[in-house]
Amino acid sequence: MQRSSPRGSGGRESSASCSWGALARGYFDEYSDIDIVVFKRKGVRLGVPRERELEYKGFLVDYEVRDYEDELRRPWSMEERWTFSHAVVHYDPEGRVAKLLKRKVPLREGERRRLLRESLSWAAWYGWDFAETWARRGDLASAHYCVTVALSLLVRALFLLNGQLVPPDKWLLSEAAKLGRLPPNFAEIVREALLVRDLTREELERRKAAVAELRAWLEAGAAQPRPAT
């Protein structure tokens, strides 16, 4: 794919580009598409739509155009930060994209600790308090759903324990399996926590026991100093 380099005032380069998604992470198969984002200076016209999906040599390409100045001011979500943490910069003559990513992407230690505490706290609320309340109300479907939410929160906490940004839900379990610090029986815990044979109290307690094992491992890990990297 050809790179374009429109110029702004003073002859300075006015755009930069990078790719993200599965291709940038080295994970690409027949079900993946190619994601590209172009950063331009505000006011520069590139002559293309802001967002577009097209086919290129048999591959589906999603691209979007963003204003660099707006991105500097706009807070990025955790999902965006995770996505851009794997981005590959293809064209950045002024180094503006590199500076933007350095400013927006990193997970600071104070933020990591805060989010880890919050994830563990919310997991306890969902997996035990909320789930039990719904079970006593006779709504076992809601009780089981709360256990599923608790599992998701604890898997998110695994990334934070490892000092990493949290991926979107689509990639949560797949990427979690690659983390350096995991319970030795993580795959079994996830299987037991996700398996729902029936919406009964017995199944609820079995699933809660699996989630409790992951919660205990995380709480023990959170109480220890982070290994030096």
Image (cartoon, grey):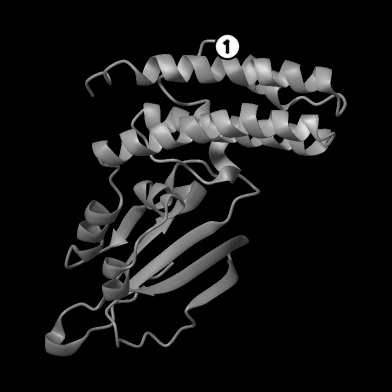
Residue at mark 1: 185
In percent of the image, x 40 and y 33: which residue is there?
Answer: 116
Residue 200: image quadrant is: top right
Q: Quadrant of residue 163?
A: top left
Q: Quadrant of the C terminus?
A: top left
Q: Residue furthest top?
A: 184
Residue 224, percent from left and from top: 31, 15
Compare residues 146 and 160 and report the one nearer the observer: 146
Q: Position of residue 86 (x, y in %)?
A: 38, 46
Which quadrant would residue 45 be assigned to in this image?
bottom left
| Residue drawn 72% across the image and 37% down it | 145
Mark 1 surroundings: few (<14), some (14-19) or many (≥20) residues within 10 A: few
Please give the name of the residue rendered at 66% of the width and 15% of the height, measured from the top-left corner.
Answer: 209
User: As rendered, which of 199 and 28 lies closer to the eye?
Assistant: 199
Disc 1 residue type (three-letter): Asn
Left or right, 135 with respect to 125, comes to: right
Q: Is residue 75 above or below residue 115?
A: below
Whether 31 is drawn above or below 65: the answer is: above
Horizontal placement of 118 versus 88: left or right? right
> Could you tell me residue 134's position as x and y percent?
75, 35
Q: Is residue 165 left or right of residue 110?
A: right
Does residue 156 appear anywhere in the picture? no
Front residue (pair 96, 30): 96
- Residue drawn at point x = 42 percent, y = 88 percent: 47
Q: Quadrant of the N terminus?
A: bottom left
Q: Position of residue 40 (x, y in %)?
A: 31, 76
Vertical arrangement, residue 200 with respect to residue 28, above or below:
above
The residue positioned farthest toward the left in the image shown? 10
The secondary structure type at the circle numbered 1 is: loop
Whether residue 142 is visible, yes or no, is yes
